[in-house]
Amino acid sequence: MNNLRVFAFAVFGMLCGMPALAQDAPKAITIATEGAYAPWNFTNAQGKLEGLEVDLANDLCARMKLSCTIVAQDWDGLIPALTVGKFDVIMASMFITDKRLEVINFTQPYAVDPSGFAVAKDSELGKLAGSTERIKLEDEAAARAAIDKMKPLLKGKVVGVQAATANAEFVKKYFGDVVEIREYKTTEQHDLDLAAGRIDALFAQQTALAATLAKPEFTTYTVAGPGFFGGVFGKGTGAGLRKEDKVLKDMLNKAIDEAIADGTIKKISMKWVKTDVTPVK
Amino acid sequence: MTDAIRLLGFESGGWGFALLAASLVTLVLSVAGFSLGAAIGGLAAAARVSQSRLLAGIADGYGTIFRGVPDLLTIYLLYFGGSIALTTVGRWIGLNGFIGLPAFATGTFAIGIISGAYQAEVFRGAWLALDRGQVEAAYAYGMPHRLALRRVILPQLMRHAVPGLSNVWQLVLKDSALISVIGLVELMRQAQIGAGSTRQPFIFYTAAAALYFIIASATGVLFRRGERITMRGVRRG
């Protein structure tokens, strides 16, 4: 009887006491990426993961002196698998958004990659090609002006976006009254439909658009209009982690600070996406 | 075209080996899932036709649920739900940290449960199509139960079941593509990875379609042979 009571007490203590214990710094972590989103994170023919986020993950791990395993997981399964503990960190071009923050936590952004439209060069919006303007959605006056200027040029067009992304939310919120939105499971699906002529425009991250438009079947298409960031896009691209892993979050934030400060992020970013995506503090 | 040859080839930078390996995973996963499904389906069919109201009810519920719920949902529930359950049980017995089922095992289990529900219907139909007189005649000859099962019941049961099973097999092959969502690199996921990594979706999805077609037709030949064997001694037409 006495033994049973001790055992019951021990189990009870374990169940309640667990979260209260001080967290130790982890020694090894597993980082997950999508592995199918060139040039940010992708897989080469030998099955090895490569890309901006893979380089950055290795750099951050070296700074934190952690041994890291990088694995690939289908996009739809990333957040559920993180929350059940299959891995510890997501680095998969995932925007920090309020919706996601309800479920998981994020580090500070390690990249800010504005989103924009890609259209045919001879279309009406095509006239706005070559814009290097960057618009922060928090700057409401500038955002309103840019959007009002673009709306008539996009009237009645069919725009492809990846479903369940901030890009989809942005187009719905700001252009939903003038365009028809078509949602796709992956970005290459909307790329294919643009090439097939089934849709008139894409709305995606400008680095991804640049990679798509570099292909031969897209020579008559261009990125047009300003790049948008902030607002529904959240605070940029961050590393996702479980809410309770506070120590790991601090370690990652410190490592990202260092990587921004010494120009590592800029170097990796120029190597993979040909533009600098270092977040502006 | 040269792009396609280079990307799907076996030289360095070619995805040939990766795609073939993934096809093998698809095939092994489907065979394992289908076999498990046959075991589950056989038991469920036996329960359906048994005298016990309780067993018949349970088997009926199982069939209704897993044929009615989307397959993708079943897979998510097993994979994420299974991990949560295991991890919770682990905490209870003092193991901290994540305990998960390997993706392949979960995939096999999911396909087994889903295809089992369909196979149960096939087996039940085959049982109902069996001529009662044949069974009675076997017992009238004084055959023990097992002998009657082996010589009379099973051969005729399979005769009615094989065409239906061949149908379920095609479903299983296509369901195996859904297992890509839980991180198992089978043919579908490998094609997605290749498409996203090289930004050449058309080449990779076409190659995957061709590989699925090859697997389906090669296994289709086996089922037709099975059909011929089980139809021996039956006059057609």
Image (cartoon, coloured by chain):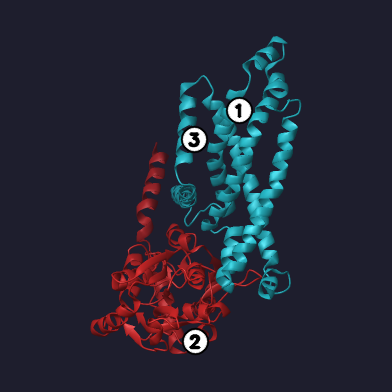
In the image, is B13 to the left or to the right of A250? right
Chain (cyan)? B
Q: Amino acid at mark 3?
A: Gly
- Rounded to the nearest angstrom, the CA distance separating label 3 from label 2 is 57 Å
| Quadrant of residue B10 within the rendered picture | bottom right
Task: Pick whichever, B64 or A191, lies toward us.
Answer: A191
- Label 3 sits on a secondary structure element that is helix
Q: Chain of mark 1?
A: B
Label 2 environment density (alpha carbons within 10 Å; few <14, some 14–19, many ≥20):
some
- Label 2 sits on a secondary structure element that is helix
Q: Amino acid at mark 2?
A: Thr
Label 3 environment density (alpha carbons within 10 Å; few <14, some 14–19, many ≥20):
many
In the image, is A76 to the left or to the right of A177? right
Q: Which residue is mark 2?
A: A264
Measured as percent of width and height from the top left, residue A258 is found at: 44, 85
Marked residue nearer the N-terminal end (1 or 3): 3
Q: Chain of mark 2?
A: A
- Give the position of the C terminus of chain A as an image quadrant: bottom left
Instruction: Please say if the residues under marks 2 and 1 sit with CB atoms less than 8 Å apart.
Output: no
Q: Which residue is mark 3?
A: B63
- Label 1 sits on a secondary structure element that is helix
Above or below, B87 relative to A248: above
Q: Which residue is mark 1?
A: B126
- Rounded to the nearest angstrom, the CA distance separating label 2 from label 1 is 67 Å
| Quadrant of residue B139 within the rendered picture | top right
